[in-house]
Image (cartoon, rainbow, N blue to C red):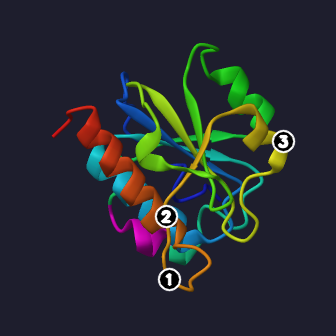
């Protein structure tokens, strides 16, 4: 039986303003929400395996609603394979609650890849050591923001900085 999401003819964005990358995402509803944001902002969504869910998960589909055909979903079997698909001059920026710099300090270029880690453990130190890493500040007693909220904050900030709107 064909996967109901990957069997959909997805939109392909030829010259993206930004790329959203989820490294080994674990929670389907977060990925569905991020996919909807990517459809709204016309950005590709890269999913680096292994995923913590099936792409036919009902929560994933529900969060993405009927927008899946509008999402440019690009799957990668590993981080290594993802890097093989990215131009070596491309800007890759990591996001982690463990980073010391705030996301507003990043100088983002058009076409940058915004890399977010899995919800429960974040990006591995080895990846964070390879690229600039930023965080969204939190003042209260909460340890972290929801991943899809963080992606929304960061993406729309950078789209504004790039004068998309």
Whichever of callouts 2 and 3 sits on the residue coming sooner in the sequence is 3
Badge 2, how many Cα within 10 Å: few under 14, some, many 20+?
some
The residue at which mark 2 appears reads as 137
Spot occupied by residue 64 in the image (x, y as percentages of width and height): 40, 65
Q: Marks 2/3: CA distance?
A: 22 Å
Residue at screen point 52% across, 77% down = 59
Q: Is residue 9 left or right of residue 88?
A: left
Q: Residue furthest left?
A: 165
Q: Marks 2/1: CA distance?
A: 10 Å
Count of all numbered marks drawn on residues in the image: 3
Whichever of callouts 1 and 3 sits on the residue coming sooner in the sequence is 3
What secondary structure predominates along the stretch shown in magenta? helix
Spot occupied by residue 35 in the image (x, y as percentages of width and height): 43, 56
Q: Is residue 53 above or below residue 51?
A: below
Q: Is residue 112 above or below residue 3?
A: above
Q: Is residue 118 left or right of residue 39?
A: right
Q: Which residues are magenta?
A: 60-66
Badge 3, how many Cα within 10 Å: few under 14, some, many 20+?
few
Residue 77 appears in the rendering: no
Q: Residue furthest bottom?
A: 141
Q: Say which mark, if any, is on residue 140.
A: 1
Q: Say which mark, if any, is on residue 107.
A: none
Q: Marks 1/3: CA distance?
A: 29 Å
Mark 2 or 3, closer to the camera: 2
Q: Is residue 35 left or right of residue 95?
A: left
Instruction: Indicate the secondary structure of the residue bearing disc 1.
Output: loop
Residue 72 falls inside the magenta stretch: no
Instruction: Indicate the secondary structure of the residue bearing disc 2.
Output: loop
Spot occupied by residue 81 in the image (x, y as percentages of width and height): 76, 30
Residue 21 appears in the rendering: yes
Mark 1 or 3, closer to the camera: 1
The residue at which mark 3 appears reads as 126
């Amino acid at each position: 039986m064909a996967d109901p999401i990957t069997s959909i003819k997805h939109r392909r964005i030829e010259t993206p303003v930004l790329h959203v990358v989820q490294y080994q995402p674990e929670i389907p509803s977060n990925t569905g929400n991020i996919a909807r944001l990517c459809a709204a902002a016309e950005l590709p969504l890269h999913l680096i395996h292994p995923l913590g869910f099936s792409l036919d998960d009902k929560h994933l589909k529900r969060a993405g609603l009927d927008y899946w055909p509008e999402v440019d979903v690009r799957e990668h079997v590993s981080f290594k394979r993802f890097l093989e698909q990215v131009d070596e001059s491309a800007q890759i920026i990591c996001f982690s609650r463990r980073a010391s710099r705030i996301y507003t300090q990043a100088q983002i270029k058009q076409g940058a890849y915004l890399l977010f880690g899995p919800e429960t453990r974040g990006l591995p130190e080895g990846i964070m050591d390879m690229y600039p890493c930023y965080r969204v500040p939190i003042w209260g007693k909460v340890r972290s923001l929801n991943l899809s909220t963080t992606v929304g904050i960061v993406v729309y900030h950078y789209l504004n900085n790039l004068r998309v709107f």
